[in-house]
Image (tube, rainbow, N blue to C red):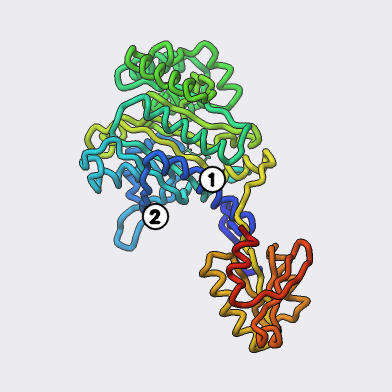
């Protein structure tokens, strides 16, 4: 062990488990690529104000969990706590919305940072794959994104997940509801922090997980009773489109989510096997965010799915992903000259697309075969000087133990056939 440890709330992704993370990223992004989303990558840090204005000063993410730093030049930056604000900033800065083809559909994958209290499924550094569709108000787009997430979870083999759906209203109806809720909350017995939250963002009090608060919320005005006709109609269309696509969802009138920028459609994907950190992904419509960060009106919708929690969900359900073999063939040279010749063969096999590894370090036969077993290779090729002088290698099937001599110049074709 070294003197150093990974910082609190973080962990290293190491083989063989790391393969599942790559497979999850791939499975989430595959449906997006098929649906016309283009890949975007933004910096790991941004101006602090992008998040305080975009995500919201009153949110936990900004007020408590942001990693901020001051550069030597005196600029204050924040490690990105989420992806949407950065992606929208990048789209605006690069004028993607002016290229004429709205919505601008983007997907991304990367690391995010929140100074949270670490626990199972909650880390200070975590990974998300996200998607944003910028510049169009159309319930079909909201439905498309929810369907793509559900298809990704299904492609991974997950079953025990649910889709929670709600509408948060728009700039017409939400203020009316907000006032009604605030009036209701003012009559409750709440602690100082919650009273403050009720003043800044009363909707988030509905999200309070504490029993004592939840009990008092019985009889609170519900947003769905305040939705304007346009929002009701919009939400109804999203629901119908999901039903038509065979996506089961649950209406969750209390779903508000922890970020300020959401309007209308909001949704969360929760998994039954994760204990208290049950959200595997979430998102919604954010029609006002562009203007909040100084852009034009660009109604948009998006989601982010957590890679770490998706891997935990797979484990909880006992799903074994079908991962590509890391080593098809393991090459074992016997002797110095064989070592050079066989390494040439290894390079040739790799260039032919066969996953091949080599017994490095001049191991003896017994040790080298142990390595081949540990690498879970399908075949070993063993060659001593005499074999090579005859232009052959010994090809051993690691499952059956069967061994045959194969001409060196026929090796690539033979292995390709056997591995097909
Ligand atoms: P949010 O932006 O909070 O809605 O997060 C979207 C998804 O990212 C969540 O559903 C989680 O799967 C994942 N996520 C958020 N915060 C964390 C965290 N601290 N640790 C691990 N995963 C997280």
Residue depicted at 46% across the width and 22% down the height? 166
Q: Is mark 1 within 8 Å of ligand 1?
A: yes
Q: Which type of secondary structure does the marked residue at label 1 adopt?
A: helix
What's the CA distance linking mark 1 and mark 2? 26 Å
- Residues under numbered marks 1 and 2 in contact, where contact means CB atoms less than 8 Å apart: no
Of tags 1 and 2, the one toward the viewer is 1
Q: Nearer the viewer, residue 301 or 344?
A: 344
* Number of residues whose C-alpha sits closer than 10 Å to that of mark 2, classed few (under 14), some (14–19) or many (20 or more): some
Quadrant holding the C terminus: bottom right
Q: Is mark 2 within 8 Å of ligand 1?
A: no
Which residue matches tag 1?
307
Does residue 78 appear to the left or right of 20 in the view shown?
left
The relative height of residue 414 versus residue 131 in the rendered view (above or below) is: below
Q: Position of residue 106 (x, y in %)?
A: 36, 43
Q: Position of residue 126 (x, y in %)?
A: 52, 48
Residue depicted at 46% across the width and 40% down the height? 31
Q: Which type of secondary structure does the marked residue at label 2 adopt?
A: strand
The relative height of residue 273 versus residue 367 in the rendered view (above or below) is: above
Q: Nearer the viewer, residue 50 or 170?
A: 170
Which residue matches tag 2?
69
């Amino acid at each position: 062990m070294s003197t150093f440890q990974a910082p609190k709330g973080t962990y290293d992704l190491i083989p063989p488990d790391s393969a599942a993370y790559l497979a999850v990223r791939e499975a989430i992004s595959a449906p997006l690529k098929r649906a016309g989303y283009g890949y975007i990558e933004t910096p790991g840090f941004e101006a602090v104000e992008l998040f305080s204005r975009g995500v919201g000063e009153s949110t936990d993410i900004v007020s408590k969990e942001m990693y901020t730093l001051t550069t030597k030049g005196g600029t204050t930056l924040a490690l990105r706590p989420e992806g949407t604000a950065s992606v929208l900033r990048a789209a605006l800065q690069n004028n993607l919305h002016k290229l004429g083809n709205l919505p601008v559909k983007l997907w991304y994958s990367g690391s995010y940072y929140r100074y949270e209290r670490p626990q199972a499924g909650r880390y200070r550094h975590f990974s998300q794959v996200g998607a944003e569709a910028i510049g169009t108000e159309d319930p079909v787009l909201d439905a498309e994104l929810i369907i793509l997430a559900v298809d990704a979870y299904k492609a991974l083999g997950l079953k025990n997940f649910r889709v929670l759906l709600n509408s948060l209203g728009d700039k017409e109806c939400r203020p009316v509801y907000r006032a009604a809720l605030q009036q209701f909350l003012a009559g409750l017995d709440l602690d100082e922090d919650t009273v403050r939250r009720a003043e800044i963002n009363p909707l988030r009090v509905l999200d309070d997980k504490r029993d004592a608060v939840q009990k008092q919320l019985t009889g609170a005005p519900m947003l769905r009773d305040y939705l304007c006709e346009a929002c009701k109609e919009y939400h109804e269309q999203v629901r119908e489109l999901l039903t038509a696509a065979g996506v089961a969802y649950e209406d969750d009138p209390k779903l508000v989510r922890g970020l300020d920028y959401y309007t209308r459609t909001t949704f969360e994907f929760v998994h039954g096997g994760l204990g208290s950190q049950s959200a595997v992904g979430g998102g919604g419509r954010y029609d006002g965010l562009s203007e909040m960060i100084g852009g034009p009106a660009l109604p948009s919708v998006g989601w982010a799915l957590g890679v770490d929690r998706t891997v935990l969900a797979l484990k909880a359900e006992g799903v074994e992903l079908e991962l590509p073999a890391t080593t098809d063939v393991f090459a074992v040279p016997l002797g110095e000259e064989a070592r050079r010749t066989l390494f040439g063969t290894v390079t040739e096999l790799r260039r032919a697309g066969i996953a091949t590894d080599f017994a490095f370090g001049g191991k003896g036969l017994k040790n080298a075969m142990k390595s081949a077993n540990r690498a879970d290779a399908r075949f070993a090729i063993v060659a001593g000087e005499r074999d090579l002088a005859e232009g052959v290698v010994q090809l051993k099937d690691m499952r059956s133990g069967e061994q045959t001599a194969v001409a060196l110049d026929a090796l690539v074709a033979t292995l390709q056939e056997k591995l097909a």
